[in-house]
Image: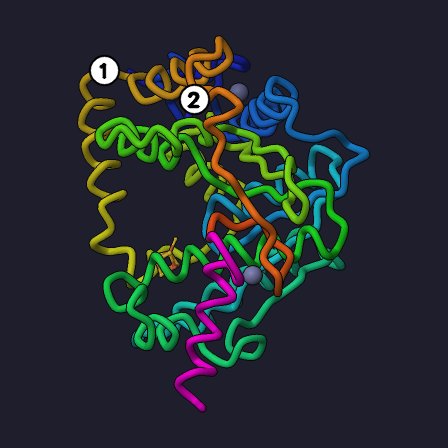
C-alpha cells in the first residue's frame, strides 16, 4: 500500500511512525523546521533578537540545525573545532570540507569561527590523548573536555547569547538511558534542552533538535540536499553510547514512539521538579585562575588548563 502525505495526499516519502505521520518531501521539509520552532518556544531556548552560535561538525544534525535556524530567521553564526583527527580517514579535514560546502551551497557569506586545537594549544586531540593519562584510557574523554571548554569560551568571548548544538532525540535518549542505568543523579539534574548561563564565564546552551529522531534528521539532510560527513569519528566506533542507541532502537522497533515517550516523560518530570537538587547540594564551583571558566577543582587551574600545564612540565 502506498502511503499518502497527510497534508497533500501525494505519495509520502517519510513515515514518522512515532507521530503516525506520513509526509511528502515538501511537507516534511516544512514540518522539521516547524517542530524545531515549537521546541525553541516550549523550552524558551532563545529568541530572534538573540545572537546564536551553532556548533557544527560537518555531520547531518549540526548542518541541518544551522540551515533550519537560518530558514526560521534566527541570527545564527557557526563555529567549529579543527580537532586534528586523521586516523587514515582525514576525518577532521573531511568534516571541514563539508561545512565549507554547506555554506557555499546554501548560505554564502555566513560567519564561521574555526578554532584549530593544534595551532591554539600545540597539540591535536590524538596527540594530547596519547600524552595524558586521561587520554590514554579514552581519547573521547579528553576530546569532550576540550570541545566543551572551547565552545563555551568562544560563545562567551564573542558575546553570543546562546551556544546551540545538534543533539537529536537519539543522543538525548541514550544519555538519559545511561544516566538512569548508572543513577548519575548530578547528570540527570543537568540534562535539559537548555542550560542557563548561571555562573560567570558560562554561556547559555541549548539543543533545539532534542525532540527530532536521528533518522528524521538524516532524511531532512538528504531531502534538502545537504552533503554531510557519513563516517563516524574513528574513535566513536566502540563508544558505549552506540550500544545504548542500539538498545533503544530495538525498543523503538517494537513500540513506535517509545524513545520519544521515554525522553519527554523525563522532561515532564523535570518540569514538575523531580530532578532538582536542593540549593545546598549544588556542586561548589570556583573560577579557574587562568581561563576564567567555572571549575569543580578545589584549587588553581581547571581540568582543561591542567591538560596543557602538564605539557609544559614535560617540555621543561
Ligand atoms: S569527536 Fe572526539 Fe567524538 Fe571523536 S574523539 Fe570521541 S569525542 S568520538 S563526538
Ligand atoms: Zn505533502
Ligand atoms: Zn582554566
Instruction: Look at the picture and state if 296 lies above or below 5.
Output: below
Q: Secondary structure at mark 2?
A: loop
Circle count:
2
**Farthest residue, direction top:** 272
Q: In the image, residue 224 lies at what x, y percent?
A: 54, 42
* Magenta stretch secondary structure, dominant: helix
User: Quadrant location of the N terminus?
Assistant: top left
Identity of the residue drawn at 69% across and 37% down? 71
Q: In the image, residue 272 lies at what x, y percent?
A: 48, 8
Instruction: Look at the picture and state if 191 lies above or below 284.
Output: above
Q: Which mark is residue 11?
A: 2
Identity of the residue drawn at 65% across and 20% down? 41
How crowded pointer 1 is (Cα within 10 Å; few <14, some 14-19, many 20+) is rated as few
* Nearer to the camera, 35 or 114: 114
Identity of the residue drawn at 67% across and 51% down? 155
Marks 2 and 1, how far apart at CA: 25 Å
How crowded pointer 2 is (Cα within 10 Å; few <14, some 14-19, many 20+) is rated as some
| Ligand 2 lies under 8 Å from the Cβ of mark 2 | no
Q: Nearer the viewer, mark 2 or mark 1?
A: 1
Instruction: Look at the picture and state if 25 lies above or below 64.
Output: above
Q: In the image, residue 251 lies at what x, y percent?
A: 20, 23
First in sequence: mark 2 vs mark 1: 2
Reading the image, the residue beneath label 1 is: 255
Q: Secondary structure at mark 1?
A: loop
Identity of the residue drawn at 43% across and 37% down? 219
| Ligand 2 lies under 8 Å from the Cβ of mark 1 | no
Q: Quadrant of residue 240?
A: top left
Q: In the image, residue 85 lies at what x, y percent?
A: 39, 71
Magenta highlight range: 298-316
User: Quadrant location of the C terminus?
Assistant: bottom left
Amino acid at each position: 500500500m502506498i502511503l499518502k502525505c497527510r497534508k497533500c495526499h501525494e505519495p509520502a516519502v517519510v513515515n514518522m511512525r512515532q507521530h503516525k505521520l506520513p509526509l511528502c518531501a515538501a511537507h516534511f521539509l516544512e514540518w522539521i523546521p516547524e517542530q524545531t520552532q515549537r521546541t525553541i518556544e516550549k523550552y524558551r531556548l532563545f529568541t530572534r533578537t538573540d545572537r546564536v552560535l551553532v556548533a557544527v561538525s560537518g555531520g547531518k544534525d549540526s548542518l541541518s540545525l544551522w540551515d533550519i535556524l537560518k530558514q526560521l530567521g534566527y541570527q545564527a553564526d557557526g563555529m567549529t573545532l579543527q580537532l586534528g583527527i586523521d586516523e587514515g580517514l582525514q576525518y577532521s579535514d573531511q568534516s571541514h570540507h563539508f561545512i565549507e560546502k554547506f555554506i557555499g551551497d546554501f548560505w554564502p557569506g555566513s560567519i564561521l569561527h574555526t578554532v584549530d586545537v593544534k595551532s591554539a594549544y600545540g597539540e591535536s586531540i590524538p596527540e594530547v590523548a596519547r600524552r595524558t593519562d586521561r587520554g590514554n584510557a579514552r581519547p573521547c574523554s579528553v576530546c569532550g573536555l576540550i570541545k566543551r571548554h572551547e565552545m563555551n569560551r568562544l560563545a562567551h568571548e564573542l558575546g553570543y547569547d546562546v551556544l546551540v548544538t545538534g543533539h537529536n532525540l537519539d543522543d538525548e535518549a541514550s544519555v538519559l538511558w545511561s544516566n538512569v542505568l548508572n543513577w548519575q543523579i548530578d547528570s540527570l539534574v543537568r540534562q535539559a534542552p537548555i542550560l542557563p548561563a548561571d555562573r560567570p564565564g558560562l554561556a547559555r546552551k541549548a539543543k533545539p533538535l532534542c525532540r527530532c529522531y536521528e533518522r528524521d534528521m538524516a532524511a531532512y539532510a538528504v531531502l534538502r540536499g545537504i552533503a554531510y560527513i557519513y563516517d563516524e569519528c574513528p574513535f566513536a566506533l566502540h563508544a558505549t553510547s552506540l550500544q545504548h542507541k542500539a538498545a533503544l532502537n530495538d525498543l523503538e522497533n517494537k513500540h513506535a514512539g517509545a524513545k520519544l515517550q521515554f525522553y519527554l516523560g523525563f522532561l515532564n518530570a523535570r518540569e514538575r521538579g523531580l530532578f532538582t537538587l536542593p540549593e545546598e547540594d549544588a556542586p561548589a564551583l570556583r573560577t579557574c585562575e587562568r581561563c576564567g571558566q567555572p571549575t569543580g577543582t578545589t584549587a588553581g587551574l581547571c581540568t582543561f588548563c591542567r591538560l596543557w600545564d602538564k605539557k609544559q612540565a614535560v617540555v621543561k
